[in-house]
Image (spheres, rainbow, N blue to C red):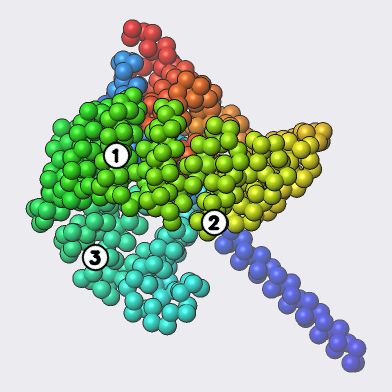
Amino acid sequence: MIANDIHRFIAQINNNRRLIFLRAIIIVFGVFTAFIGVEIALRAAGGLLASIPRGVTLENEHKKGDYVILCLGESTTQRQWPGPLEEELNGRKLGVRFRVIDRGKAGTGSTAILYRLEHELERNRPDMVIVMMGINDGEWIWENPVIYDDTLKVKSALFLKNMRVNKMWRYIRGGLVNRWFENVDLADYRKAQDEDQDLLARIERGVLYQKKGEYDRAKAIFRKAIKTNPEDPRGYLAMGELYRLQGNYEKALEMYETAIRMAPREGRAYDGLESLFCSGEDFNRVVRYFEMAINNDTKDPLGYGRLAHLYHLRMQFDMAEKYYKAAVRAAPQESMPYNELCAFYHERRKEDEVVSVLQSAIRAMPNELHFYMLLGQRYCEAGKYEEAEKVYREEIKANPNMQKGYIELGDLYRRIKKYDKAFQIYRECLRTLPSQPRGYMSLGDLYRELGEYRKAENMYKAYIEVSEKDPEGYIQLGELYRLWGDPDRAIEMNKIALSVTPRDSQLYMRLGGLYHLRGEHEKAGILFKQGLAHMNERPVLNGALALSAFLEGNSDMVSRYRRKSYLRLEVARNYQKLRDMVLAAGAELVCMQYPMRDLSSLREILGGDPRIHYVENRANFEEALRRYKYSDIFIDSFAGDFGHCTPLGNQIIAKNVCDVIMREVPLSGPGNDHRPLAAAEETHQ
């Protein structure tokens, strides 16, 4: 009896389990079916919108026949090569007007570029997108690339991320986040008990979220800052910058205008307005605010300088010159207006005007040492050494207690091989200013140049003592011992310098080179690995390790360390997503590599779709650097192996891009037959 009851009870439980399981399957199937239905509906709606002819709903409808090119990137793009590219393309006279839109943003990363892409595509409806990005996302890795697209895990993640339902959910979640996360705190700010009452702390908290790409959280915090402090312009400035990063330029302009009305002299608001002009906003509207700033304070050189810079970017050089000069007149005792006017004339290749401005600056501010240096450099570059000598002597006379003038004059004498006068002026510097060490270093360099190593050694040791063991003294003393044929002491000096500055990759290179000279290649390799441990991945040290492995005869290690650099995984995926969005919009995609960098990693990431075109800037820049000085091509070396380009460097990029477009891209504008642009050029010639 009991056994039968137990059997019936177990059977009932099993039946209930089956019912629960079946109900669960039905619920999951229903949710999945609804999910798929919503996805299909959203995609159908998106396809319907995409089928609307270009130009019908455009915010910036371009003229019929224009071939629109959208340029994306960072500071290496913003106000760099897009302008010359437009001139280069239109100069080919193809029968089509090219309009190049510069959407480069200084300091931005690939995630922010991708975040704004959908808006830019909808707003501008480009025929072509050119992208060069990734340098601000962190140093490139030196290892085998991740296989980005051929694993089920990665494909599944990308598929789910790109689903329309997922996008809709993120949109809804973003609205909820604006309310939910208003009071969220980052760990770095938890110790500040009163930070909810502190506007600056709240804005800084929002900026941290902004830097992490969490724009919805940042926006919620900035909104609360404005609500709590509606009369303080800082909240509006922060919100304006966020809108600008998101590509919502009209909202950004509204925030900047509000900040200016509250604080007419707030410089950051005008900087934001200038960046919006670079994004294509109405020029005259921005100019009115800059003029308002001048009217509020006619003696403030910043107002004139900002307006001059705006006209400068617009390439209205007469107006730019007018306001640069006005800034000098407004503040004749401030150095910045003179510097900006000099830079303007130098860019315009008006060197006589540069000299005139520097002379005026020295008369107005005889204690500003850098003006003497700049004027002396101009004279030296022109071969006017007597004029340079006079300038440096004027500097010494005006500032006898500063070593700079003595050193510059002594270096001039070294340059023109008047060594007796160089010795004389360096010694005069030491007699006049015995506690300032640079004279010892300069004398040491001169003795070393002339082969008087013992005297050079004494000068370098004196420099180390007076400068309180500045590592530069040990570095130069080590170089002296190397030239003297004493590698042991050279190694000792460089080790001391490295102990003071353990994150200097050049010191590792210098010390490792000394080991190589002694045949101690294994020690060099160990040293370079220590450098990598201190500084993570550094391409220069990887290259040095490859050399060490080669000298040791270890071919396997050579191939390991000589592998080309690859984009980080996040950047690679952003490139892939950008590719998908651009091609889906029906535009051609041009992927460009930075100067001096290898292009193959981009090809591996993005594939060989015929609508994707690649631009390499390695061979052309290597050739340019054989013909010109580095400073003719780049204005700095921020990336290590390249920097921001001069006008000549940007022209090299523009010509290279133009050549690739002409050779590979079909011309699909009105009245054209989808031929490559080069063929169209032949027709119109």
Task: Identify the secondary structure beneath mark 2.
Answer: helix
Residue under numbered circle 1: 393
Question: Residue at image x 61%, y 41%?
Answer: 454
Q: Amino acid at mark 1?
A: Arg
Question: Residue at image x 47%, y 42%?
Answer: 442
Q: Position of residue 578 (x, y in %)?
A: 49, 41
Relative to 216, is 45 above or below? above
Q: Which mark is residue 109?
A: none
> Is 33 on the left-hand or right-hand side of 20?
left
The tag earlier along the polypeptide, 1 or 2, is 1
Residues tagged 3 and 1 counted as in contact (Cβ below 8 A)? no
Task: Identify the secondary structure beneath mark 3.
Answer: helix
Q: Quadrant of residue 145?
A: top right
The tag earlier along the polypeptide, 3 or 1, is 3
Residue under numbered circle 2: 465
Q: Which mark is residue 233?
A: 3
Question: Residue at image x 23%, y 69%?
Answer: 232
